[in-house]
Structure formats: structure tokens, C-alpha cells
């Protein structure tokens, strides 16, 4: 199956629903966007209504250009929108895709919501689209994000040295590269992650 940027994909289970991000979701996300620590490790900021509008409208435009596919995340347990995530750098020829720009409000972190999201996204990429690889990246300063990716089966595979300004000081930070492969998902990681849900 070829990934279609124009199709409205809905991914859901009993805990979470991921649907295409739209400009109408700005009101649902603006209070989360104002949380002080949310954008610490992001180059592109979406804090406050004005920045959030620019952030969301840019990724929606990039969807029409077939560069990104953003989702809004709805937590069924709390009946609230929790944040966003997106696919990018999709290649049908190479059978690769990347996942990132993921952020959740503080009340949703550490609740298991992320594992449910990742399970649905991995299932879609490997079982439905039958891609071979999904890539991820995070600032080396962002230990929590790196640990979260490893907890859902991603493997560290490399480092881009001195890639971006550090969020901790005036120095530079590395980007840690991670990935999960179709073979790993099918043979092992799918069952492990499902057991954690």
C-alpha cells in the first residue's frame, strides 16, 4: 500500500485516537502549548496562540506538499486532546519514513498514552504500509524522549555531532538517531509493546 498524503487516516484503539491535524484544532491545543517546559528541545516553537497557529498551519501546508503528515492525539481515557505527532521524509522507493515532532501536555506524559500511540503508528507503518524502516531523532539533551523511544523498541544507531544549539547552555548538542525495522517489529517488538499496553 502506498502512503497517500491526501487520505484522512484514522488510527485508534480503546485508549487513543489519532486523526489528521487541522487548523480548527488550535483552540484544543493552545493551553497545552503554553506549558513552560514543552518546547525546551524544539527548534520550531509553538508556545502561545500566535506561534501555535504558525506551527500548525506550516505542517498542514507541508501535508499538501507531501512533506509531512501531522496527527492530533486524542486521549479517550480523559476525553481530551493530548498533543500532536507527525510522519515526515516518506520514501516509497526506499520504503522509509520518519516519525517525530511529538509533544503531549504534562498531564498525559507517563500515563501510557505514548505507548498506545506508537503501537498504532508502528502497526500502520509496518503492517499496513509494509515499509521497512522508521527513523527518529532527538537532541542528546532530551534524555526523556530518547528513553521513551527506546522503551517502545527503537534502537540507537548513530549521532549527528554538534547538530543544534544546546537547550541547557551556550554549547552545541548532538542529535541521537534511532530507528525500528519491520523485521524487528514483526519478530519481537510488536508483542513486547502490545504486552506493555
Image (tube, grey):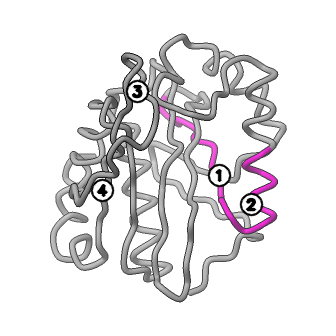
Which residue is more in the foreground, 149 or 124? 149
Q: Residues within 10 Å of mark 3 (few under 14, many from 20)?
A: some
Bin the neighbour count of mark 2 within 10 Å (Cα to Cα): few under 14, some 14-19, many 20 and up: many
Q: Disc 4 vs disc 2: which is toward the camera? A: 4
Please state the extent of the stretch shown in magenta in the rendering: 58-77
Give whichever of 166, 47 is nearer the camera.
Answer: 166
The answer to whether residue 61 is above or below residue 135 is above
Q: Where does label 3 land, which residue?
A: 166
Query: Which residue does the image show at 36% across and 45% down from the upper left?
Result: 175
Q: Which mark is residue 70?
A: 1
Of mark 3 and mark 4, the one earlier in the sequence is 3
Disc with the residue nearer the chain's start (3 vs 2): 2
Q: Nearer the viewer, mark 3 or mark 4?
A: 3
Q: Which mark is residue 91?
A: none
Q: Earlier in the sequence, mark 1 or mark 3?
A: 1
Q: CA distance from mark 4 to mark 1?
A: 20 Å
Question: What residue is shown with label 4?
Answer: 178
- Tell me if residue 106 comes above or below residue 162 in the rendering: above
Q: Residue at x 46, y 82 (%)?
A: 95
Above or below 48: residue 7: below
- Is tag 4's residue or tag 2's residue first in the polypeptide sequence? 2
Q: Which tag is nearer the camera, tag 1 or tag 3?
A: 3
Above or below for 73 versus 33: below
Which of the two discs, 4 and 1, sits closer to the camera?
4
Q: CA distance from mark 1 to mark 2?
A: 7 Å
- Residue 117 location (% of width, % of height): 44, 49
Residue 2, given in percent of the width and then of the height, sits at 60, 84
Q: To which residue does mark 2 refer?
A: 63
Mark 1–mark 2 CB contact (< 8 Å) = yes
User: Are the two marked residues, 1 and 3, in contact with CB atoms closer than 8 angstroms?
Assistant: no
Amino acid at each position: 500500500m502506498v502512503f497517500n498524503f491526501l487520505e484522512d487516516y484514522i488510527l485508534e484503539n480503546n485508549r487513543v485516537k489519532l486523526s489528521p491535524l487541522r487548523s480548527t484544532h488550535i483552540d484544543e491545543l493552545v493551553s497545552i502549548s503554553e506549558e513552560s517546559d514543552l518546547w525546551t528541545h524544539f527548534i520550531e516553537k509553538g508556545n502561545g496562540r500566535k506561534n501555535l497557529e504558525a506551527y500548525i498551519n506550516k505542517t498542514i501546508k507541508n501535508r499538501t506538499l507531501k512533506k509531512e503528515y501531522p496527527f492530533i492525539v486524542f486521549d479517550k481515557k480523559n476525553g481530551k486532546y493530548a498533543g500532536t505527532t507527525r510522519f515526515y521524509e516518506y520514501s516509497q522507493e526506499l520504503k522509509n519514513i520518519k516519525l517525530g515532532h511529538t509533544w503531549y501536555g504534562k498531564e498525559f506524559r507517563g500515563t501510557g498514552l505514548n505507548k498506545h500511540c506508537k503501537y498504532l503508528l508502528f502497526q500502520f507503518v509496518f503492517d499496513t504500509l509494509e515499509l521497512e524502516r522508521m527513523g527518529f531523532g532527538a537532541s542528546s539533551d532530551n534524555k526523556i524522549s530518547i528513553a521513551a523511544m527506546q522503551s517502545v523498541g527503537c534502537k540507537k544507531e548513530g549521532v549527528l555531532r554538534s547538530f543544534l544549539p544546546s537547550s541547557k547552555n551556550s554549547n552545541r548538542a548532538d542529535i541521537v538517531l534511532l530507528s525500528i525495522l519491520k523485521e524487528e517489529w514483526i519478530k519481537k517488538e510488536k508483542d513486547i509493546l502490545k504486552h506493555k499496553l
